[in-house]
Amino acid sequence: CAEYDRLILKKERRASNRATDEVRMPLGAMSIGDSCELDVGDVTFSIAVKAYNGEDIPQKNYAYWFDYDKISNDLVIRNRQSGDFITIDREGHRSKLQDYCINEKLPRAERDTMLLLCAGSEVLMIAGGRRSETALVDGDTRRILEVAVGAAAEE
């Protein structure tokens, strides 16, 4: 198949990350010290709420930190939907997720299978990829929502 400026040859594989149902976590369902693991397709989301005392945010490719108190909707792990958007800078500018995917030249085949952590229509993170500039940790943060993304264990 042709994608932007390159030709890609690959074996057809099933879309294992196509979420048929949303995995929902009601806002406020977790308190400091709580954690859980959610398997969606072949991806595991490890979610924890921790107290924050101003320590440095670890720079890991697979873990994301959010100010839990700045999130205003239930959290949902799902695939993209019409109307989704992502905040692209600290000034609060938004981009429709569809436009973001095109601008970043994400292959069409991946767009429908990428897993998202959302609060309503706002994308907080693309699993293994971009993090929104919403709910950033700052000096006023008291509770951290830590989301780590990894491969689900084989059975």
Image (cartoon, rainbow, N blue to C red):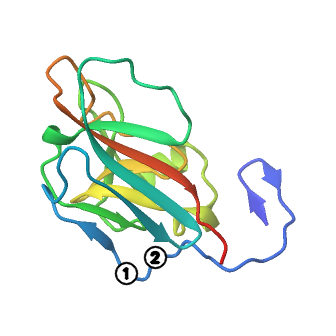
Q: Is residue 61 above or below residue 82?
A: above
- Could you tell me if residue 114 is visible in this image? no
Q: Nearer the viewer, residue 17 or 148?
A: 148
Eyeballing the image, is 27 above or below 145?
below
Instruction: Identify the image quadrant of the C terminus.
Output: bottom right
Residue drawn at 79 percent across, 66 percent down: 1
Q: Position of residue 146 (x, y in %)?
A: 36, 42
Contact (Cβ within 8 Å) of mark 1 with mark 2: yes
Q: Which residue is pictured at 18% across the width and 27% down the height?
A: 141
Amino acid type, mark 2: Ala
Q: Can you see residue 25?
A: yes
Q: Which mark is residue 19?
A: 2
- The residue that appears at 45% across and 46% down in the rendered structure is 100
Q: How many marks?
A: 2
Characterize the local packing of mark 2: few (<14), some (14-19) or many (20 or more) Cα atoms within 10 angstroms.
some
Residue 112 lies left or right of residue 7; in this view the side is left
Circle on res. 21: 1
